[in-house]
Amino acid sequence: MQNEQFIDDIQSLWSQDRISWTVFSNGRSALERIFSDPPDMVIAEQSLPEISGIDVLRMFRAENIYRQICAILMIESGDVADLSSAGLNVDELVILPAPPDEIRLRVELALHRTTVTLDANPLTRLPGNTSIINTVQRLFAYGTDFALAYADLDNFKPYNDKYGFSRGDEILLMAARIIGNTVSMQQCVPSFVGHIGGDDFVFILPPDVVAVACQSIIRDFDTIVPSFYDPKDRAHGYILSNDRQGNEQIFPILSISIAVVRNIRAKHTCYAELAHAAGQLKSITKDTLGSTYVIDRRK
């Protein structure tokens, strides 16, 4: 960045504990630092000497391992006509002059989009672990009562082994749609759906509606899942597949197990406590044949 007053104005929009800045006066020095010590975000002015701002952003984003860095280009309004959208590989474009509130909002939104995109599960596009933990921590901070539900599919690996990963992915997409649609239909706050990975999902709802949502998810899942089996297996109600030791066994039609931990009046204080409590409940659901849910009602 060139204008010292403008740099000071940008830095003053955030507290030091929110964003720590490193400023470079030319593109070459900025690139050297990016490659040696990658930051979370790069804001570049188009008018940088030696290497323009857009070239700085293009050059480091050409490398796969640096594509996750949030890239923001700031450009004077008179130079916009010279830009080519084909080479504009940025997360946000700020046209100067711009009000400070607009700059702050655009930067915050760009950071949020980058985080969500990187965190999203590549198959279901649902938020992943980072978003799940951040959402729970915000609810803790606000003192909001909520229920966190962990849902996973029983006997998913044998299904994958018999029918292949492609059909296994179809099962995961179906489960994601059912959970997502059910949570949306509650029209409640708080509400959230995430995908931890594999066949593990989470959702968040108010404690007083989570039981109804669990019942709806189980009902819809049990109704739809048989259609993902070949007619003969569907008629038998089971498949023959190998267990983890490689021995052929009988495995029933897929089911879904849901463990629900309620956080009422700050019963729990961190995500790790919730995860531990849910792990205890999951052992109960796994001992039950077929789809089931368990809610922790301990005070």
Image (cartoon, rainbow, N blue to C red):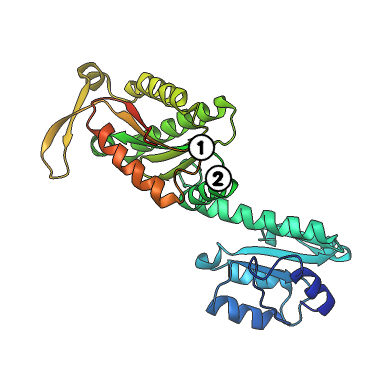
Task: Say which residue label 2 marks.
Answer: 139
Q: Position of residue 177 (x, y in %)?
A: 48, 31
Q: In the rendered image, which quarter is residue 283 located in?
A: top left
Task: Say which residue label 1 marks.
Answer: 146
Q: Tag 2's secondary structure?
A: helix
Could you tell me how far apart the alpha carbons at marks 2 and 1 are, in whole angstroms? 8 Å
Q: Is residue 275 left or right of residue 42?
A: left
Q: Quadrant of the C terminus?
A: top left
Q: Nearer the viewer, residue 75 or 120?
A: 120
Q: Position of residue 251 (x, y in %)?
A: 19, 29
Q: Is residue 269 left or right of residue 199?
A: right
- The residue positioned 60% from the left and 56% from the top of the image is 114
Say whether disc 2 or disc 1 marks the residue closer to the N-terminus: 2
- Number of numbered discs visible in the structure rendering: 2
Few, some or many residues within 10 Å of mark 1 (<14, 14–19, 20+):
many
Q: Position of residue 285 (x, y in %)?
A: 28, 32
- The residue positioned 29% from the left and 28% from the top of the image is 254
Q: Nearer the viewer, residue 153 or 135?
A: 135
Q: Is residue 30 left or right of residue 279?
A: right
Q: Position of residue 268 (x, y in %)?
A: 44, 46
- The residue positioned 78% from the left and 60% from the top of the image is 103
User: Among all residues in the image, which is located at the extreme top?
Assistant: 235
Q: Quadrant of the N terminus?
A: bottom right
Q: Are marks 2 and 1 in contact (CB under 8 Å)?
A: yes
- The residue positioned 29% from the left and 25% from the top of the image is 229
Q: Amino acid at mark 1?
A: Phe
Few, some or many residues within 10 Å of mark 2 (<14, 14–19, 20+):
some
Q: Amino acid at mark 2?
A: Leu
Q: Tag 1's secondary structure?
A: strand
